[in-house]
Amino acid sequence: MRFNVTNLSDLVASIDPRKPAIKIAFIENHGCGFFEKGEKSTLIKSSPRVFCSFGWDKVAGGPVEIQGNLTQTKEMIVDGQKIFFYEVKFLPAHLPRIAPFLEELKKLSEQNIVSIAS
């Protein structure tokens, strides 16, 4: 399942801590997606490897780092604004690190607090 997490203010996630304008959009069992608004992408990578950081007090005592590969960068127009969307696929060895987040997101989706993204 792909969980839309844009409305969870207590979930903190980053793809690059030096770029706070890049926000988390969704989390799923094998990856996640981030987005930013602007005229050009600020996420310039010489390598596809990224280090995502997730923090959520109800799940983890501190930040959890999960490595992955940037698999897609897509430019879109949404509501008249240019958006850059970044999709990350987690490394298989790091998948267990996202499991507690997915368990909590599943509970929240059953309570209609979190929606399933398409």
Image (cartoon, rainbow, N blue to C red):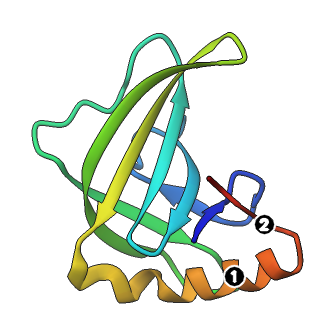
Q: Is 93 on the left-hand or right-hand side of 104?
A: left
In the displayed structure, would residue 58 be above or below residue 63?
below
- Label 2, secondary structure: give it: loop
Residue 17: image tag: none
| Residue for badge 1 | 106
Q: Is 15 on the left-hand or right-hand side of 11?
A: left
Q: Nearer the viewer, residue 69 or 46?
A: 69
- Name the kind of residue labelled 2 in the image: Val
Q: Upstream in the sequence, badge 2 or badge 1?
A: 1
Q: Is 9 on the left-hand or right-hand side of 65?
A: right
Q: Residues within 10 Å of mark 2 (few under 14, many from 20)?
A: some
Tell me the residue at 68%/85% (across/down): 104
Tell me the residue at 77%/54% (across/down): 7
Q: Position of residue 56 (x, y in %)?
A: 63, 75
Tell me the residue at 31%/40% (across/down): 72
Q: How many marks?
A: 2
| Residue for badge 2 | 114
Q: Residues within 10 Å of mark 1 (few under 14, many from 20)?
A: some
- Label 1, secondary structure: give it: helix
Tell me the residue at 39%/51% (across/down): 15
In the displayed structure, would residue 4 be above or below residue 22?
below
Q: Is 54 on the left-hand or right-hand side of 3?
A: left
**Does residue 46 appear anywhere in the picture?**
yes
Q: Position of residue 2 (x, y in %)?
A: 57, 64
Q: Quadrant of the N terminus?
A: bottom right
- Name the kind of residue labelled 1 in the image: Lys
**Does residue 22 appear anywhere in the picture?**
no
Distance, label 2 to label 1, CA atoms, is 8 Å
